[in-house]
Amino acid sequence: MRFSVLMSVYKNDNAEFLKTALESVYDLQTRKPDEIVVVFDGPLTEELYSVINEFRQGKEDVVFCYPQEHNKGLGEALRIGTGYCTGDYIFRMDSDDISDKDRFKRQCDYIEHHPDIDVLGTDIAEFNSSLEEKMRVRACPKMHEDIVKMGKKRNPMNHVTVCMKKTALEKCGGYETLLLLEDYYLWLKMIVAGCKLENINESLVYVRVGNGFDSKRSSKTRIAGWKVLQKYMRKNRMISWFGAFMNMVYIRAFVYTPPSIKSFLYNKVLRKV
């Protein structure tokens, strides 16, 4: 099984976090990727360039960088990066998270035993500053049918954890720009295209939530994106008019919920500890 790791880097990313993320997907992995594709989403800082150049030393035949002249957003950066990936499977990775040392081995082993799966994700463990602290878990449904059911109301996959067949990405049209919701849109497109999605209920990626997590979920841009998702699901008969209406009520209420109440919901309702 030949696979690529796809990552986008932006000028506002933290250089130290990027260093840790890169080390976690190659140096510390028990099963190493065949290639790592890094898209520069516009010009970067000298600190970020330095981290990437240092990481590439001795791995020039594994790590490939594709600078973009202007910032185009995550969806477009990933669409561009997908075109450069030569692996049969593509693993996603963010520039500030940490992959478990056995992540690729666990997911590759699972896919090799279930070759009909087009997208395989895992749970995530969320932390603020250290992997030693008590972490909360975002668990997703394991089986395809439950993923489809959840997808009608909420994002059913953890984007940073997924391993995708490149042919499945191409089949559904790939990434599109939908600010803050590129991944959710992609899962819906894959479901409509007849792809099979599953999750492993293990936390194989550690995600930083002290890095603008709450502010992104309070962005009013998210409301506009949800309108696009509801329109797409209605068009493809995934949900009813009433279902779309209730989804919009939910997202408006959530976006305008005070941060303190959001924190309570994440800790007590939307996550496991």
Image: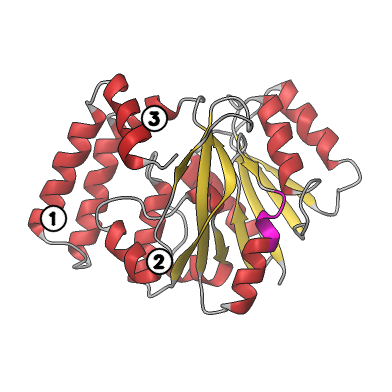
Residue span colored magenta:
101-105
Q: Is residue 11 left or right of residue 269?
A: right
Residue on which disc 2 sits: 190
Other residues around mark 1 within 10 Å, as few (<14) / some (14–19) / many (≥20): some
Of 241 and 30, the residue lying toward us: 30
Determine if residue 101 is in view: yes
Of 71 and 166, the residue lying toward us: 166
Q: Quadrant of residue 243?
A: bottom left
Residue on which disc 1 sits: 243
Of 35 and 97, the residue lying toward us: 97
Asked if the residue under mark 2 is in contact with the one under mark 1, i.e. CB atoms within 8 Å, the reply is no
Instruction: Give the foreground label among 1 and 2.
Output: 1
Residue at image position (64%, 25%) is 14
Disc 1/disc 2 C-alpha distance (Å): 20 Å
The amino acid type found where label 3 is placed reads Lys
Residue on which disc 3 sits: 216
Asked if the residue under mark 3 is in contact with the one under mark 2, i.e. CB atoms within 8 Å, the reply is no
